[in-house]
């Protein structure tokens, strides 16, 4: 009896277990499906407009941006480098050998013209100053001797030959004084303050200390590779633009330049061309164009790499990312949000086309909400309803 009931009992237990597992596994899926929002189709308003209901999941895949008109560049973005404005920059070194005994400033300090940056102990200055003092003393002694001898020679108290010899000695002493003065001037062409053999190194201009290689007890000499201090006006910089050969004829002096930096992604800086390149690099086929870059907030720094666009003299356009543009045959379109959830496809005329963005000349009015994300999805749905426009 037991054996006869064992197999049916096990079979029943297996069926019950499978049923329970199936119900358990299915319940989360059904629960999850019941909480998901159903995909709501767009409503077509005319041949070029789609409208989505509020809360439609498609709206999460669409992004818009208000883009104001701006000046149109001559071409695509150009590589450029920020450098010091050499017209307001002083690289300060020394013309003698010595040792730094005191440093007065640090990088970032604002200084005035004539302010002491460091003090240097220089035996060369001490020797030159001592030679000058010795020459002056010798000249003065011989001058007094000539003055005394003038009265004596007039009374025949001394021979004329001796008088002439004394005058010759005075001339030689004067020449030695001039030589010593010139040597000291050559050692100190800027006229730095000197006390004994200690030289005070001063700034020749107003500005900010942007670089300092001077360190305590550093041995210095005229042959140092780098200046001890760099003082500049950080509000004025130069922009060195690598300009393609094909654009050389279109860029003029005083052309405006728009500058962008990865360090400040939402800001635009302006520069003005002041010098055109004189030589084309044989390898890159580019010339270097120099522009003066305004940096009133001192945000940009020398040696930064930036992106530059030389602007056309006239004309305005709207710069849109290429992801916002859809093409049908020879025509270009983009989508504009005219109301919440409502998007219209518009034909546009492109002024310039770049690698990342293009400038729209016709088809937009003012700062409209341009679809910069999801344009292809909108175009696919609208095209599926109306057919390909090409």
Image (tube, helix red, strand yellow):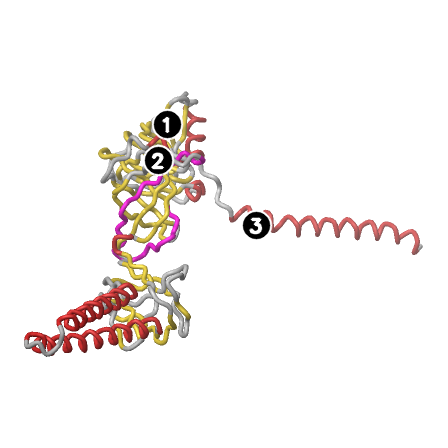
N-terminal label among 2 and 3: 3
Task: Tell me if residue 327 comes above or below residue 137 in the rendering.
Answer: above
Label 3 crowding class (10 Å Cα cut-off): few <14, some 14-19, many 20+?
Answer: few
Q: Which residue appears at 31% of the width and 50% of the height?
A: 267
Confirm whether the magenta stretch covers residue 240. Answer: no
Task: Name the element at disc 1.
Answer: strand
- Mark 2 residue crowding within 10 angstroms, few (<14) / some (14–19) / many (20+): many
- Where is residue 49? Give x, y as percent: 35, 31
* Whether residue 281 is situated above or below residue 160 in the rendered picture: above
Quarter of the image for residue 135 reads bottom left
Residue at mark 1: 332
Instruction: Give the number of the mark in front: 2 or 3.
Output: 2
- Does residue 298 appear to the left or right of 145 in the view shown? right
Up the image or down, 300 lies above or below 319; here it is: below
Task: List the residue tagged with mark 2.
Answer: 343
The residue wearing badge 3 is: 31
Quadrant for residue 327, please give it.
Answer: top left
10 Å neighbourhood of mark 1: few (<14), some, or many (≥20)? some
The CA span between labels 1 and 2 is 16 Å
Q: 329 or 9: nearer the eye?
A: 329
Q: Which mark is in front, 1 or 3?
A: 1
At x 37%, y 24%, the residue is 331
- The image shows residue 350 at horizontal and vertical percentages of 33, 29
Residues in magenta, as a range: 283-306
Asked if the residues shown at circle 2 and circle 3 are in contact, with their CB atoms under 8 angstroms apart, the answer is no
Viewer can see residue 248 = yes
For numbered disc 3, what is the local secondary structure? helix
Q: Residue 165 in the image: x percent, y percent?
A: 19, 70
N-terminal of the pair, mark 1 or mark 2, is 1
The structure residue drawn at horizontal position 31% and vertical position 27%, both measured from the top left corner, is: 349
Can residue 371 be seen in the rendering of this structure?
A: no
């Amino acid at each position: 009896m037991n054996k006869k009931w064992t197999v049916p009992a096990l079979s029943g237990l297996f069926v019950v277990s499978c049923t329970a597992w199936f119900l358990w596994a299915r319940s989360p899926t059904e629960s999850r499906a019941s909480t998901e929002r159903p995909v709501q189709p767009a409503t077509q308003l005319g041949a070029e407009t789609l409208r989505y209901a509020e809360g439609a999941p498609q709206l999460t895949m669409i992004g818009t941006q208000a883009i104001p008109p701006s000046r149109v560049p001559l071409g695509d973005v150009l590589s450029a480098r920020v450098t010091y404005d050499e017209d307001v920059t002083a690289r300060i070194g020394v013309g003698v050998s010595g040792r730094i005994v005191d440093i007065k400033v640090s990088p970032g300090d604002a200084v005035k013209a004539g302010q002491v940056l460091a003090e240097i102990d220089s035996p060369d200055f001490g020797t030159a100053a001592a030679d000058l003092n010795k020459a002056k003393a010798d000249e003065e002694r011989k001058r007094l001797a000539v003055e005394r001898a003038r009265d004596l020679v007039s009374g025949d108290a001394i021979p004329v030959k001796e008088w002439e010899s004394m005058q010759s000695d005075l001339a030689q002493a004067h020449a030695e004084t001039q030589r010593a003065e010139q040597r000291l001037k050559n050692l100190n062409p800027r006229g730095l303050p000197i006390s004994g053999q200690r030289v005070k190194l001063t700034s020749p201009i107003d500005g900010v200390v942007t670089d300092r290689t001077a360190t305590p007890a550093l041995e210095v000499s005229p042959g140092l590779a780098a200046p001890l201090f760099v003082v500049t006006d950080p509000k004025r910089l130069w922009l060195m633009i690598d300009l393609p050969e094909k654009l050389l004829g279109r860029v003029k002096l005083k052309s405006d330049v728009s500058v962008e930096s990865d360090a400040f992604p939402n800001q635009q800086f302006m520069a003005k061309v002041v010098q055109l390149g004189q030589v084309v690099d044989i390898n890159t086929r580019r010339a270097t164009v120099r522009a003066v870059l305004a940096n009133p907030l001192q945000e940009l720094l020398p040696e930064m790499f930036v992106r530059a666009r030389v602007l056309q003299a006239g004309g305005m356009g709207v710069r849109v990312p290429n992801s916002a543009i859809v093409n049908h045959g020879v025509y270009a379109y983009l989508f504009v949000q005219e109301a919440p959830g409502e998007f219209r496809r518009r034909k546009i005329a492109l002024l310039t086309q770049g690698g990342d963005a293009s400038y729209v000349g016709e088809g937009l009015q003012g700062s409209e909400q341009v679809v910069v994300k999801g344009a292809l999805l909108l175009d696919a749905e609208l095209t599926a309803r109306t057919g390909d426009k090409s």
